[in-house]
Amino acid sequence: MTILVFAEHNNTQLKGDTLKAVAAALKIGGDIHVLVAGHNAMGVAEQVAAVKGVSKVILAQDAALEHPVAEALAPMLTELAPAYSHLIAAATTTGKNVMPRVAAALDTAQVSDIIEVVSADTFKRPIYAGNAIATVQSHDSLKVITVRVSAFDAAPATGGGASIESIPVPAQQITATVIGQALAKSERPELTAARIVVSGGRALGSAENYQALIAPLADTLGGAAGASRAAVDAGFAANDLQVGQTGKIVAPELYVAIGISGAIQHLAGMKDSKIIVAINKDEEAPIFQVADYGLVADLFDAVPEMTTALSH
Ligand code: FAD
């Protein structure tokens, strides 16, 4: 049994989510290879080679692979697939873009967003926004899998000693190019990787209030800022800060929900957080059913007080 994990990176740095995908591969067992497709990405290949449990790094380099373009990556994975029992990627925006194309090309039923490996062919995955857990057995000879990163601890980044094998990139595979990229820059940690997340909801009332209340508390705690969909739809916070079923799924050590009611679609994105703190002026708010610590208070009083107390 040999598994191929798809690595995400920015040509310099391996993304932590890939270590979670490797962790899932380690649970399945067997030989683990990792595909690093990029441009001037030898440094990334070396980082992957050091990951404990990886036996081979497959390095595909081409200027057209500088950005993770699914149109270029999917044919490459499809071509490599026959040598493997499992193809695994993190269930990130990129993983969710690339892997279904590969599964379709291979006529394989993808097993998406797994949270547990039961055996080499059986996996657990949430359905109905996390309200039920399905145990799925795949009879496909080649299994295409995406991994929910919040459900796996990262594989150790050091301690490995994999070989690096370069493979050629056929020019005809590159059918799309990136002509520009606009990235939101933030000094705060990335939402899905943060140990602490402070999220604000509709109750904030405006983008100004979000900036004035959520951002300082997140910064004081050294955490990421998040938001409910209502707050995002109302323009209080950027789209990529949405936590929930149709946003990001997070499981930090501490999640602080401020002025968020706790709709099931929001809970689907954060209920696996280790400690949940909720501030809401309605003591009947559903968020209190999942909260470890609840404060029934007006957020406009409680949040500045809390931020001040924590900064001393
Ligand atoms: P509300 O539900 O309006 O809650 C605001 C809360 O603030 C209330 O509990 C209120 O008591 C409290 N409050 C008001 N004033 C104050 C105050 N001054 N101080 C303290 N507390 C106060 N939602 C998500 O978040 N993420 C998703 O990914 C997502 N996906 C969805 C997908 C689908 C298909 C659908 C149908 C919905 C989805 N939703 C999602 C929307 C979800 O159903 C809720 O509408 C949304 O989460 C509500 O956001 P909220 O809690 O900020 O607002």
Image: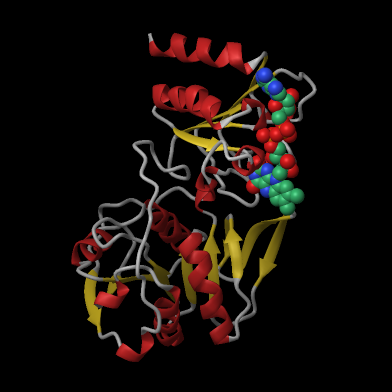
| Left or right of 35 in this view: 43 | left
Residue 76 sits in which quadrant? Answer: bottom left
Look at the picture and state if 98 lies above or below 257.
below
Q: Going by the picture, which residue comes out furthest to the right?
A: 284
Residue 216 location, x and y as percent?
A: 44, 23
Rendered residue at 34%/68% (across/down) = 67
Residue 152 location, x and y as percent?
A: 49, 50
From the viewer's side, name the closer residue of 215 and 62.
215
| Left or right of 245 in this view: 250 | left
Rendered residue at 29%/72% (across/down) = 56
Can you see residue 267? no
Rendered residue at 38%/36% (across/down) = 188
What colour scheme was applied to this rendering of the protein?
A: secondary structure
From the viewer's side, name the closer residue of 33 and 182.
182
Quadrant where the C terminus sits is top left
From the viewer's side, name the closer residue of 20 and 121.
20
| Left or right of 254 in this view: 22 | left
Quadrant where the N terminus sits is bottom left
Split into quadrants, the picture shows ligand 1 in the one at top right
Look at the picture and state if 189 lies above or below 77.
above
Rendered residue at 59%/59% (across/down) = 114
Can you see residue 196? yes
Residue 301 sits in which quadrant? Answer: top right
Look at the picture and state if 289 lies above or below 142.
above
How many badges with numbers are in the image? Answer: 0
Residue 293 sits in which quadrant? Answer: top right
